[in-house]
Image: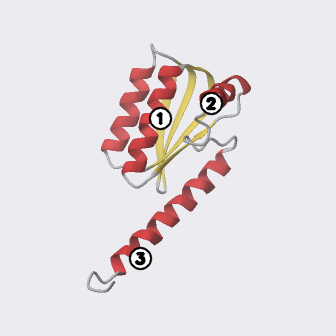
Amino acid sequence: MRISDRSEDFLAIVCVSGELDQATVPELRERLSSLLDEGARWLLLDMRELEFIDSSGLGVLIAAARRAGEAGGELTVVCARPNVLRVFDISGTRELLNLRQEEAQARELLAECRQRATAASQAGDSHDPNQP
């Protein structure tokens, strides 16, 4: 497995290729945990070059998605390989992980989610606590 990450605008982009299984999961778990600990809230996982994923890999993705959500952000996975997509379908995690087949779709989704979160935050900040 190979992992690389970079920041663009408000996004933390993590590219994962190869096989994500019990032997390689600790490396991805550590990378995602570090990004989240450093304040990343909007994660785009580019898994278009991922050849295989097992249940331990799914577990890491689900945990990262939950952490991002708890921090007020979101995670999306970009994947187009039929065998990997099948794992997401069988496990029922396609919606939870905001699965998209194109990076542009994932970026658009995260931008929309960020815009809604920002608007909600600003609406909450402008609310007078003395008013019902």
The answer, for residue 40, to whether it is visible in the render is no
Q: Could you give the CA–CA distance between mark 3 and mark 2, rounded to whole angstroms?
A: 35 Å
- If you read the primary sequence from the N terminus, does the residue marked by circle 1 or circle 3 appear first? 1
Front in this rendered view, residue 2 or 22: 22
Left or right: 106 in relation to 129: right
- According to the image, label 1 marks what residue? 62
Identify the mark at residue 50; answer none if there is no mark: none
Front in this rendered view, residue 132 or 101: 132
**Amino acid bearing label 3:** Ala
Quadrant for the C terminus, please. Answer: bottom left
- According to the image, label 3 marks what residue? 123
Q: Could you give the CA–CA distance between mark 2 and mark 1, rounded to whole angstroms?
A: 11 Å
Left or right: 19 in relation to 31: right
Q: Could you classify mark 2 by the number of other residues whose Cα lies within 10 Å: few (under 14), some (14-19), or many (20 or more)?
A: many
Relative to 124, say whether 10 is above or below.
above
Q: Name the residue located 47 percent from the left edge and 21 percent from the top edge.
A: 56
Q: Could you give the CA–CA distance between mark 1 and mark 3, rounded to whole angstroms?
A: 29 Å
